[in-house]
Image (cartoon, rainbow, N blue to C red):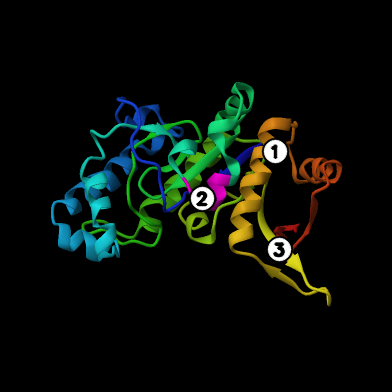
Amino acid sequence: MLILLPPSETKRPGGRSRVLDHGRLALPELAAHRDRVVDALVALAADEDEAARVLKLSARQRGEIAHNAALRTAPTMPAADRYTGVLYDALDAGTMDAAARRWLGAHVMIHSAPFGPVGALDPIPAYRLAAGTSLPGLESLRQVWADAVSAALAAASPSFILDLRSEAYAALGPVPAEVPSVYLRVVTAGSDGTVRALNHFNKHTKGELVRRLAFERPRIGSVGGLRRWADGAGQVLRPGADGELDLLV
């Protein structure tokens, strides 16, 4: 099983001395696309006012432009440790034991805007870029990434993909039709049975789900296998709209 996670807007600063190396990231065939986006971000950072406008930064957030300017020389840390926020606070990769972290590295990719999907333990620098941003000198990020990411996922030949990305990041690399997969939503049901999607608890629940999988390390190769594990784990998974899977909380 391969799990696809969204990134987070908030990130932990710092890292180790190893700098960004696209050839060491998961799906190395995406290196040329990564170079294009990183080059555009670095170039944009040379004009602080324009960078703030394009990236929609407040005056207090302007310091993040320096992260983009230093993308090729900045220290890196594992992606799962770099991201913070609701999902990654619940995942809490930094407190996992060695076996759980190895599972995370082997089974989880985080879909970033500048680098595409990277392994959960792949070293990346801090940056500022959202899925919907249009960078000067590039077509939309969807045009840069979608076909290339889909092809790379197909070439990786995972037995099954559990897609936990937001819709914006799923659009940057749709799972190819030939790869067995399911898109999971976190929902709640009212007293009248009406189902509605959640926001904050959506992210928290996804982080908790991946953390539990990392510690239990079940062998899952299909939607059916995921649902059987969920039944035993006390998780309520049921078919949703358009072939999706709903996790009821």
Q: Spatial distance from mark 3 to mark 1, Cα to Cα?
A: 19 Å
In screen coordinates, is 242 left or right of 44? right
Amino acid of disc 3? Val
Magenta region = 84-89
Q: Position of residue 178 (x, y in %)?
A: 62, 46
Q: Are marks 3 and 1 in contact (CB under 8 Å)?
A: no
Amino acid of disc 1? Arg
Q: Is residue 127 above or below residue 93?
A: below
Q: Position of residue 68 (x, y in %)?
A: 25, 46
Residue that numbered label 1 is attached to: 212
The label number, if any, that marks residue 6 in the structure image = 2
- 78 or 241, nearer to the observer: 78
Q: Earlier in the sequence, mark 3 or mark 1?
A: 3
- 202 or 3, nearer to the observer: 202
Residue situated furthest left in the rendering: 47
- 87 or 170, nearer to the observer: 87
Q: Spatial distance from mark 3 to mark 2, Cα to Cα?
A: 18 Å
Q: Earlier in the sequence, mark 3 or mark 2?
A: 2
In screen coordinates, is 202 left or right of 70? right
The label number, if any, that marks residue 63 in the structure image = none
Amino acid of disc 2? Pro
Q: Going 83% across and 74% down the picture, which residue do you hit? A: 191
Secondary structure under tag 3 reads strand
Q: In which quadrant will I find the N terminus?
A: top right
Q: Does the image show residue 128?
A: yes
Determine crowd level at label 1: few under 14, some 14-19, many 20+ residues with C-alpha closer than 10 A. Answer: some
The image quarter in which residue 103 lies: top right
Residue that numbered label 3 is attached to: 187
